Amino acid sequence: MRVGHHHGGWTISLSFVIALILTMMPLPEMAEPFRPAWMILVLIYWCLAVPERVGVGIGWLMGLLLDVVNGALLGQYAIALAVIAYLTLHLHKRIRNFPLGQQALFIMFMVLIGQGLVLWIKGIIGQSPNNWLYWAPAITSGLLWPWVFLILRDLRRRFRVS
């Protein structure tokens, strides 16, 4: 293997496509507020696993994609995901050593930061949500983190993503 040669770029790309599909998939009206932040989960995983390949630029691009898919003000999710990617990259050496329970708390905190940034931008343009369920995805994302982590880690190992 050549130095600097990377494998598994399609695996990373496919995981983001699946996260986007899960984000767009219709849910019953009662479950909609609890939709996990799939894109954030996948972004954080790849920032932790291969920080030299997935970073702020990928976070910004995935955020722009979310802006388009959600019909949001162009840039609001891009800013949130870029900040989340930056913070994850800055702390990745510590976070990788945390047990999954502590990582789940970190995920909840990162989703809260992302939602707070989006809420701030929505507030500026007069579109603030009017109930506490706006924050529910942080809880569901944290609860799902161990499974997302284990599935993506298995894929990374199976397809030798480096």
Image: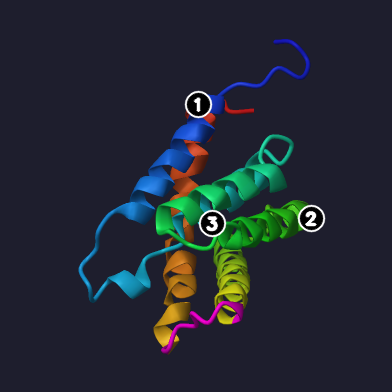
Query: Would you say 131 lies left or right of 73 here?
Result: left
Residue depicted at 70% across the width and 10% down the height: 1
Please provide percent x and percent y for residue 49: 64, 42
The image quarter in which residue 107 lies: bottom right
The local crowd at label 1, few if under 14, some if 14 to 19, many if 20 or more residues have their Cα within 10 Å, is few
Of residues 91 and 26, which is closer to you in this image?
26
Amino acid type, callout 1? Trp
Sort mark 3 into few (<14), some (14-19) or many (20+) by Cα contacts within 10 Å. many
Quarter of the view holding residue 131: bottom left
Residue designated by label 2:
90
Q: Is residue 83 left or right of residue 68?
A: right
**Residue 68: x %, y % from top left:** 46, 51
Instruction: Report which residue position mark 3 lands on.
Output: 40
Q: Which residue is mark 1?
A: 10
Point 60% across, 76% down: residue: 116
Give, as a three-letter code, the residue at label 2. Answer: His
